[in-house]
Image (cartoon, coloured by chain):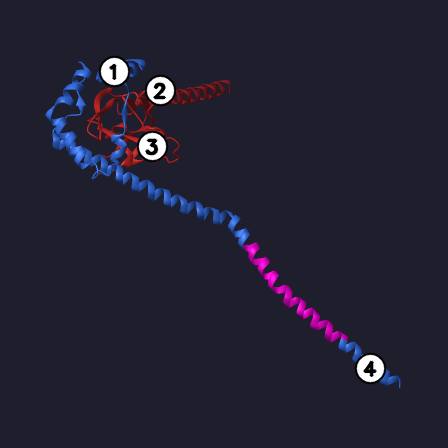
Chain colours: A blue, B red
């Protein structure tokens, strides 16, 4: 009698233990996914804020800006060279003689056949130069501006630094 | 014994004096180096890409210092500014542009700098850029005028 009761109790305990194990297994299965997701998100966060990844992003940015800068340098170079070709082709002399009346020299340049030739070529080849033509056409001159006013501005600048090469 | 001490003191004094004179001379020499050579000036017409005379630029150099005075009668369009650039197109042409700054509302710009080799510049280019632009690069497609520099520049 005693042994039968004991056996029943043992079976009961074994059954409880089995249920407990099943429950903990189910719980642990349910918890695995959030834990894995948490670890992954923590890793991602730490990587995204780490100095190494920041350096990589910065290096990528620097590479892009270097490429952009080199591209601009190339364009500026081509523009400068094309402009010089056009001026040389027209025979116009942009360098004004030192001394003498600068506004008269500017007027002489503006009235010269070479300058008119250059003007024609520039307006024809503006798009080939890669220049935004509408910007230039929309530029406004100051009211009453002429060459003597322009030269006066320049002379005010050079005299303010104590002379120099006019 | 006393003679040896005197000799040591004299030697130390001589060494210190020599070192001080070297320091003084080197700073004067650097100054003189920056100011050596004859200053040469040139005035060029800035030609607008539309075929007008945009302005004038007076440029002086002794090989190391560079002084640029620039004047224009033109005004940039609303919300834009004119920037002036020195462009290096010598030695196979790096195309490197150095910004001299914004042309003031008065239509003038003054630029002064001491450089290692101021003769390298070949051109002055004026661009029109948005006033709020954060880019340190020239907006080359919005260039409006140019002049080129004659020797001693371009060397």
The residue drawn where x is 30% and y is 33% is B97
Distance from Cα at disc 2 to Cα at disc 3: 41 Å
Q: Which residue is at the far right?
A: A1
Distance from Cα at disc 2 to Cα at disc 4: 109 Å
Q: Chain of mark 2?
A: B
Q: Quadrant of the C terminus of chain A?
A: top left
Q: Are marks 1 and 3 in contact (CB under 8 Å)?
A: no
Q: Are marks 4 and 1 in contact (CB under 8 Å)?
A: no
Going from N to C along the chain, the mark reached first, 2 or 3, is: 2
Location of mark 4 (residue):
A8
Location of mark 2 (residue):
B28
Whether residue A27 appears in magenta in the rendering, the answer is yes
Left or right: where does residue A33 sit relative to residue B25?
Answer: right
Location of mark 1 (residue):
A149
Residue B104: which disc? none
Distance from Cα at disc 3 to Cα at disc 4: 94 Å
Going from N to C along the chain, the mark reached first, 4 or 1, is: 4
Marks 2 and 4 share the same chain: no
Q: Closer to the camera: disc 2 or disc 1? A: 1
């Amino acid at each position: 009698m005693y042994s039968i009761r004991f056996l029943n109790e043992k079976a009961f305990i074994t059954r409880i233990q089995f249920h407990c194990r099943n429950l903990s297994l189910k719980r642990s299965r349910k918890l695995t996914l959030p834990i894995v997701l948490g670890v992954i998100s923590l890793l991602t966060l730490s990587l995204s804020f780490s100095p190494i990844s920041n350096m990589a992003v910065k290096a990528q940015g620097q590479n892009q800006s270097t490429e952009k800068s080199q591209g601009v340098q190339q364009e500026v170079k081509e523009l400068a060279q094309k402009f010089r070709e056009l001026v040389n082709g027209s025979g116009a002399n942009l360098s004004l003689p030192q001394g003498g009346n600068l506004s008269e020299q500017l007027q002489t340049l503006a009235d010269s056949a070479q300058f008119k030739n250059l003007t024609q070529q520039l307006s024809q080849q503006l798009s080939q130069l890669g220049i935004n033509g509408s910007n230039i056409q929309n530029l406004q001159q100051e009211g009453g501006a002429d060459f003597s006013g322009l030269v006066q501005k320049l002379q005010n600048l050079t005299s303010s630094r104590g002379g120099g090469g006019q | 014994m006393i003679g040896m001490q005197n000799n040591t003191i004299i030697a130390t004094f001589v060494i210190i004096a020599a070192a001080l004179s070297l320091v003084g001379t080197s700073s004067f020499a650097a100054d003189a180096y920056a100011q050596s050579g004859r200053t040469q000036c040139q005035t060029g017409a800035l030609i607008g890409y539309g075929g007008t005379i945009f302005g004038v630029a007076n440029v002086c150099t002794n090989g190391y210092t560079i002084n640029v005075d620039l004047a224009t009668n033109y005004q940039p369009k609303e919300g834009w500014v004119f920037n002036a650039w020195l462009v290096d197109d010598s030695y196979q042409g790096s195309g490197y542009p150095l910004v001299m700054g914004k042309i003031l509302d008065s239509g003038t710009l003054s630029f002064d700098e001491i450089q290692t080799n101021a003769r390298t510049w070949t051109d002055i280019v004026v661009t029109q850029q948005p006033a709020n632009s954060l880019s340190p690069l020239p907006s080359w497609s919005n260039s409006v005028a140019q002049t080129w520099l004659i020797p001693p520049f371009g060397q």
